[in-house]
Amino acid sequence: MTKAEKRAQLLALVVPAALLGGAYVSEYGFGLFPCEMCWWQRWPHFAALAFALLSFVVPPKRVWIAIAAGGILTSGLIGVFHAGVEYGFWEGVTSCAQPSLGGDALEAIFNAPIVRCDVAPWTLLGISLAGYNAIISIGGALAIFKLLFAKGAA
């Protein structure tokens, strides 16, 4: 593998791992429970992480890295949609997420917080978590593709 491919491989592993880590820290450390669209953003990162790990052990490495980048990009695009819903640019989904708290199902339902998809529970510099996911994921995916398809990387 070229140096550019190795960097792409590392980015394909680090970006989803860091974003998922941040999501879980915000959830369990700060009580920012995910809404339905937050979960939609997590699933492609889980897949990207799996494909990035595959790229370390199963050939063809470039294919797995590219698929991981596609998952990261997918999460970023969902983040754009979610951020647009939060900022009122367009309508979102009508359902809200209720996280499972374990134990008695009925008790969990009654005690679970209702998390709206159209309200940003936290922002920094006017950008929500979905917005940051969009920026980091799309930027990361584009960087991975650029490194993979740079001259001399093939």
Image: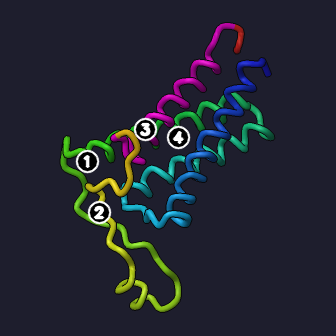
Residue that label 4 marks: 71
Quarter of image, res 114? bottom left
Instruction: Name the residue rendered at 78%, 38% in the picture.
Output: 56
Distance from disc 1 to disc 2, alpha carbons, whole Å, reads 10 Å
Quarter of image, res 83? top left
Instruction: Name the residue rendered at 52%, 25% in the picture.
Output: 142
Three-letter amino acid code at disc 1? Val
Left or right of 2? Residue 46 is left
Residue that label 2 marks: 116
Comes first in the chain, label 4 or label 3 = 4
Q: Is residue 39 visible?
A: yes
Q: Position of residue 150 (x, y in %)?
A: 63, 12
Is 129 included in the stretch rendered in magenta?
yes
Which of the numbered marks, if any, corresponds to residue 134? 3
Looking at the rendered image, the disc whose residue lies closer to the viewer, 4 or 2, is 2
Q: Secondary structure at mark 1?
A: helix
Three-letter amino acid code at disc 4? Gly
Left or right of 18? Residue 84 is left
Q: Which residues are magenta?
A: 126-151
Q: Nearer the viewer, residue 34 or 1?
A: 34
Residue that label 1 marks: 85
